[in-house]
Image (cartoon, helix red, strand yellow):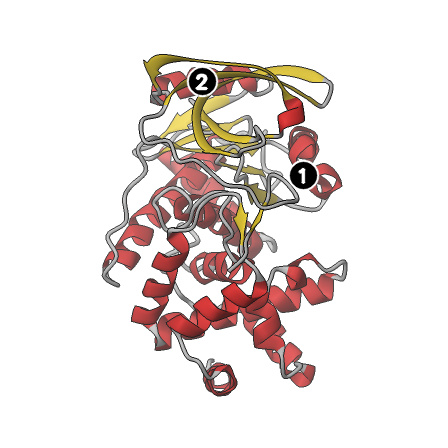
Amino acid sequence: MRKQCLLACVALIFAARSAPALEYIKIKRNNRVVSVTGQVVVEAQDGGVLIEDQMGVLWAIQPEESLAREKDDLPFQRFDASQIQVRLLAELPEGFRVFTTAHYLVCYNTSTPYAQWCAALYERLYRGFFTFWKNRGWVLKEPERPLIAVVFDDQESYASYADEELGPSADVIIGYYSLQSNRVMMYDLTGADGQGFGRSRASTAKHINRILSQPAAERTVATIIHEATHQLAFNCGLQIRYADNPLWLSEGLAIYFETPDLKNSRGWRRIGSVSRVRLPEFRQYLLDRPDNSLITLIADDHRFRQPSVRQRNQAYAEAWALNYFLIRRYPREFVAYLKVLSAKSPLVRDEKEQRIAEFKAAFSDDLEQLDAQFLRFIKRVK
């Protein structure tokens, strides 16, 4: 089936590189000259290239951006944790510190207790994430290097930093996982920086209790876990960065993992709880849900990019509901489907027909019958 490359408007043939060497590319982007050192992931016949640098950042470089390119016989090596930490602190605004855990580097300029709380949530999710898939027969590969999260002290500094990547959306998106940088970016949603919390266990516990007692606690926890779920999925082989990952799956799966438990001392405990935000939204949508809703959800990502907030929320709600249904009713088929998607190449977009065909091959040729089963299931969820 015909596929369309994201690097150009015509189909391109890619060359795989079995033994990556160190490449040096100088590019001009946004009126700046930038030097990129790394390994080529994908290369197009027209000179376009996707390169991963030593920090794990992916650069999709158009032919017209390239000013010079060289390579040598030195093998490509990613930076280790100490090198990454030095580079991050040099890159971020002054005042940032780094809190390290077994699997994360949390860069922050907000309060230390808030950064520690975020890090504890990340580690709890990390353990749960790999156990979840192992229990379903898929032993995922753990990341080779620390995962990076950047936490700004306020929305203004976060939006200023994220503007180059998000544009105007930086003012309304409260946190995100960057496919390009492979980092989770967010800000302290509590506004609790500078309130005098120290580093002791007692003061940290007090800070956490304060966070969880706020009206915005549910969305604070959900955002942290949601974006960290994306990051884990793209660093363990479950999903491939810059491949054509259907948004209904990516977003629905992150919502499946995110659901907070504000009765727990940390704010999040288990995977797969019913989303008390998305379930009511989906039930409201059911009042006038069109017959072709399942097809439009899986065929492309159009519904997630509507200008209407209401329509986007409906897409997210149905994405969560569909993931919830498939994971619980078709667990083996769901894992098999994910494995098919995890084998896709970066920068290649599937046509609608292929997306639908892959979904049918995994779950059912009769989508009308599957949709009816899906709706009966969700109507019984409490």
Which residue is under mark 1? Answer: 166
Relative to the observer, which residue lies in front, 324 or 271?
Answer: 324
Residue 87 visible at all:
yes
Relative to the observer, which residue lies in front, 124 or 338?
Answer: 338
Q: At label 2, which amino acid type do we have? A: Glu
Q: Residue at x 55, y 42 (%)?
A: 12
Identify whether 375 is placed above or below 320: below
x, y percent for residue 48:
57, 31
Mark 1: give few (<14), some (14-19) or many (20+) Cα within 10 Å.
some
Q: Residue at x 44, y 53 (%)?
A: 267
Relative placement, left or right, of 332 versus 223 is: left
Q: At label 1, which amino acid type do we have? A: Leu
Q: Residue at x 34, y 13 (%)?
A: 73
Mark 2: give few (<14), some (14-19) or many (20+) Cα within 10 Å.
many
Q: Residue at x 65, y 23 (%)?
A: 65
x, y percent for residue 99:
41, 27
Residue 111 visible at all:
no
Q: Which mark is residue 307?
A: none
Q: Earlier in the sequence, mark 1 or mark 2?
A: 2
Quarter holding residue 46: top right
Which residue is under mark 2? Answer: 23
Identify whether 105 is placed above or below 188: above
Identify whether 58 is placed above or below 126: above
Name the element at disc 2.
strand
